[in-house]
Amino acid sequence: MCGIAGLTVIATDIDANREALGLGTEHCLISADNPNLLSDKIIEFLKDEKIRKKYGLINKNRIRQKFLPEHINKMMLDYLLSVYTP
């Protein structure tokens, strides 16, 4: 929900987060074993409105392109039709 609202997301660098955030957001992905960098990144984003807006817009566009229910439903339907054999 944060992404569609145009909010910046700072997350641990795991596959699901990398997929959700997409290319160009590596700046927002932090190694789970580096809590100091995570806190530094949060502070950086809190202090810099320009960077928050930049990554918020990237997130909003990514969600609109890939993760709205219409897109997910179509992907599921396409998959089910591809494996269904009457």
Image (cartoon, rainbow, N blue to C red):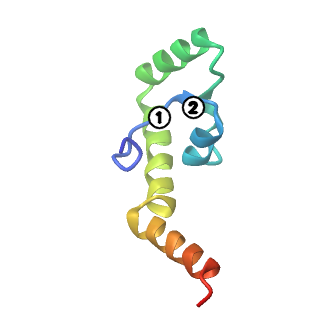
Q: Is residue 52 above or below residue 65?
A: above
**Residue nearer the viewer, 64 or 84:** 84
Q: Is residue 22 above or below residue 68?
A: above
Residue denoted by label 1: 9
Describe the element under mark 1 as helix, strand or loop. loop
Dots 1, 2 in contact, CB < 8 A: yes
Q: Is residue 82 above or below residue 36?
A: below
Q: Quadrant of the N terminus?
A: top left
Looking at the rendered structure, the kind of residue marked 2 is Cys
Q: Residue at x 48, y 74 (%)?
A: 74
Picture mark count: 2
How many residues crowd around disc 2 within 10 Å: few (fewer than 14), some, or many (20 or more)? many
Q: Which residue is at the far top?
A: 36
Q: Position of residue 55 (x, y in %)?
A: 50, 40
**Residue nearer the viewer, 56 or 73:** 73
Q: Residue at x 64, y 31 (%)?
A: 13
Q: Label 1, label 2: how many angstroms apart (C-alpha)?
A: 7 Å
Q: Position of residue 62 (x, y in %)?
A: 51, 54
Label at residue 28 = 2
Q: Position of residue 43 (x, y in %)?
A: 47, 15
Judge from the rendering whether residue 69 lies leftward or rightward of residue 79; answer left or right.
left
The answer to which image quadrant residue 40 occupies is top right
Q: Residue at x 59, y 8 (%)?
A: 36
Q: Residue at x 53, y 70 (%)?
A: 75
The answer to which image quadrant residue 68 occupies is bottom left
Label at residue 20 = none
Q: Earlier in the sequence, mark 1 or mark 2?
A: 1
Q: Position of residue 57 (x, y in %)?
A: 45, 47
